[in-house]
Image (tube, rainbow, N blue to C red):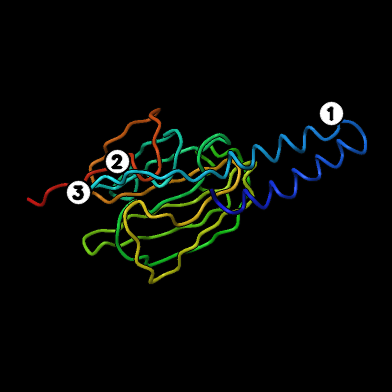
Amino acid sequence: MVKDGIYYALALGPAGALLGVILNPLAGAPLVAAALFCLYFFRDPERVIPAGPVAVSPADGKIVEVRPADGGSRVSIFLNVFDVHVNRSPIGGRIVDVHYSPGKFKVASREIASAENEHNTVVVDDGRSRVVFKQIAGLIARRIVCHKKPGDAVAAGERIGLIKFGSRVDVAFGPEWELAVARGERVRAGSSVLARRREAP
C-alpha cells in the first residue's frame, strides 16, 4: 500500500462517518466509498521480476501504441483508474536524467497525450544501452510522483514513483532491443517483459 492511499482514506472515511451520524447514513456514503476506493487505488502488490537481458513494463495497463521512434521503437501504456499506478524501472542501471515538463491534461489513451500532456522523463543507463520512459499525466491524473534523481542506482522492476488517478507511460527503446509485446495486450509493472536485448553479432 502506498502511504498516500492511507492519508486519503483517513481524511475521507471519518468525514463520511461524521456526515452519516449528523445527517443520515446515505449522506456520508459517497465519502466512505471514496475512502475505500483510495485504499484500492493505491495498492502496491509485490511482483516477480524476470531475469536476463530484458526490459520489463514500468506500468500496469493496456498497450495502446507500438511504433518506430528515433531509430528504435516506442511502447505506450494506458493506465485506467482501476490499474495499479506504482511505476517501476524497466531495466537495472543508473538514472542519468530526470526531467519534468509541464503540459496539458488531455485523455491519456490518445496519442496526442504523449506530446502535449504534462510528463516526467526518466532515462536509465545500464552501461550497454539506455531506456527512456515518460510518466504522463492524463485527464484525471494531476500529479506525477518520482522518488528518484540522477545518479541513483536502480534494479530492474524497482519502484520509482507513481501517477495519481489514470495516466499513460511511454517507453522508448533503441535498435538494440527487440519488442516482445503488441498493441492491445495488457501488461503488469515489473513482471511483464516489453523487450529483449538483441544478441551482438
Determine if residue 116 is in view. no
Q: Which residue is disc 1 drawn over?
A: 26
Name the residue nearer the viewer: 146 or 38: 38
Note whether 196 is above or below 156 in the view shown: above
Q: Which residue is disc 2 drawn over?
A: 193
Looking at the rendered structure, the secondary structure element under dot 1 is helix
Crowd around label 1: few <14 · some 14–19 · many ≥20 (10 Å): few
Looking at the rendered structure, the secondary structure element under dot 2 is strand
Q: Which residue is disc 3 drawn over?
A: 52
Name the residue nearer the viewer: 39 or 84: 39
Crowd around label 3: few <14 · some 14–19 · many ≥20 (10 Å): few
Foreground mark, 1 or 3, reads: 1
Q: In this view, does 94 lie to the left or right of 113?
A: left
Where residue 149 appears, x then y in whole percent?
A: 45, 68
Determine if residue 92 is in view. yes
Q: Give the residue drawn at x 35%, y 51%.
A: 157
Foreground mark, 2 or 1, reads: 1
Could you tell which of marks 2 and 1 lies nearer the N-terminus? 1
Whole-Å distance between the Cαs marked 1 and 3? 53 Å
Q: Is residue 190 left or right of residue 18?
A: left
Q: Give the residue drawn at x 38%, y 60%.
A: 123
Three-letter amino acid code of the residue under disc 2 = Val
Three-letter amino acid code of the residue under disc 1 = Leu
Query: CB atoms at circles 2 and 3 under 8 Å apart?
Result: no
Q: In this view, does 10 lie to the left or right of 111?
A: right
Could you tell which of marks 1 and 3 lies nearer the N-terminus? 1
Whole-Å distance between the Cαs marked 2 and 3? 10 Å
